[in-house]
Amino acid sequence: MHRIKKLTAILLCAGIMCLSSIEGVFAAQKPTGYHSIHLNIESPKESQQNKTYARSYAGYYNAAEQGLVTLVKNQGNTELCWAFGLASLGETSLIKQKKVKKNVDYSEKHLGYFMYNRTNDALNNTKGDATKVSGNWKYSGGNAQLAMITLTGWYGLANESTAPFNTNKWTLSSKLGQKDAAILKNGFFLGNNPSINVVKSYIKKYGSVVVAYHAPETTEEDEKFYDRSHKSYNCTLSEDAANHIVTIVGWNDNYSRDKFGEASKPKRNGAWIIKNSWGNKEEDKGYTYISYEDRSMCEFLSGQFVKSSTYKYNYFYDGSANPSAYRLKKGQQIANIYTAKKGTKKKKETQFALVLQLIFHSGEEGISREKAFREILKAVYEKGYEKSKNEKDFLLKESEIVKACREPSVIEIQEPAMIEKPGTLTRLNSLFDDGAVTDLVNGEQIRRNPDTIVIMTTNLDYVGCQNFNQSVLSRMNLIQPKEALTEEEMAKRAMKRTGFKNKELLSFMTATVCKIHEYLIEQDITDGVCGYRELENWVLSYMVSNDLRRSAWTALLSKASMDREERGTMERVFLLPHCDVD
């Protein structure tokens, strides 16, 4: 997997890129527009997480049926299939995150126009850079890789109302260039040959995946590769023949190989569910099935988008959409260095990426991360100490972990997998081994007492919690999995802890909590929680208010989801039909 980053070591963007205009290229009288730049990207290897996703989501999934996919659109006679694919990718990403309404509509025209008509960015770092095409830009084609680079500069995605597609206005004001409603946070380049499980995992996690393939260019190809009775497709040509971009929104492992044409029948069952950009009157209301074995499929990409209000400034120098490589000689290094223009004396604007780049690529050649981290701590301590001597005294307070290392103790570390600060988990690891030694910020070394017991806990049922790091697992002496409480165990515990005596009502409340918990899993709702704590809070709230519905809202539904519409659905389905129980 290759993530798009603002600080790049070997992928540079030159100032000018020229593409030839190819007008009037149609596939069986249908517009396409994909042109490869032959950028070889290695597909990510299949991880255990990918395999887990594949097993847990069964043989069929369709994001459109989950309400995560916007309406099928029509690219007309343009070669903007790539813009339609990326716009759909962004729409689905934000719908899945519940950040926008399900009828959100982003402008393909805006993305296409400013891909080839870039303007200087808001911070004046790309003045004079351009991506030029000969002829009319809407017939010049493109691809998702270049479009991803364009999106990193915040040239899209704008609302459809900013640049409506179905008008005759194809020249846009330069003032609209970075007038975005959504921006790309992370782009994932999956290469040309990712495994089926890898693609599935990105669809399930981010909503959809964009892919290029060969759409039929002649009547003969149409008859050979496309089965009209089943709206299915399987191209036997190689990936070099790809000419069109679509969006994968799901899969069906059991889609029969017999539903494909005899001339291109695959060896095994299984197909991707594809959203096209030829309108809803083509294929199956704009959707089709493409076999897992289609040989022309290539350039798989996915992305995570956020609303444009999430970030205020974007620092970059890559003012065109042209990727190129620069060979470094021994000892040479590359870094993007920016001037923070928007900070004030009271509120500094920190370039964290630049700080890390300078730390890890300066000074001693080949310096290890551990040694660099020690130098950071040393510099922070020395500068802080010198400054404090001129201001006031300071006190170094020991954490509970340090205290536990000095003398026999039992200490619990909750959710260690959520530790994000660089080096923190590495330094904790140094305390997990018997007799281990670690350095404090003041230079003191402490040795863990051999009688100190470290207990680490995590809740794998919570979406935000992750599995233990393997380096942590290897240092554990014992691992004790704890199964979730049964309904009966939850009710008994709640009755004992709260003193609530109404067994019938408590049984109903416990069952409701368990049903909502299962509903969150089934609907892939990741912004809420529903478990024993919520049950106990609900019981206590009801004991005060004696109002089952009101106490459910404040103690249960309010934590089950941040989406008010979703909370209302859970109330109607799981609570209201039974409110007369009290």
Image: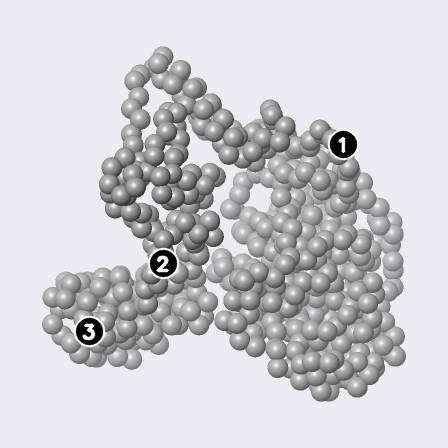
Q: Check disc 1 and give the amino acid type.
A: Lys
Q: 10 Å neighbourhood of mark 3: few (<14), some, or many (≥20)?
A: many
Question: Where is mark 2, residue-wise?
Answer: 479
Residue 482 falls in which quadrant of the image?
A: bottom left
Q: Check disc 3 and give the amino acid type.
A: Leu
Question: Where is mark 1, residue-wise?
Answer: 329
Q: Is residue 95 left or right of residue 253?
A: left
Q: Secondary structure at mark 2?
A: loop
Q: Secondary structure at mark 3?
A: helix
Q: Position of residue 542 (x, y in %)?
A: 18, 66
* Front residue (pair 255, 321): 255
Residue 560 falls in which quadrant of the image?
A: bottom left
Question: Where is mark 3, residue-wise?
Answer: 506
Comparing labels 2 and 3, the label whose residue is closer to the camera: 2
Q: Residue at x 52, y 30 (%)?
A: 371
Q: Quadrant of the C terminus?
A: bottom left
Residue 496 falls in which quadrant of the image?
A: bottom left
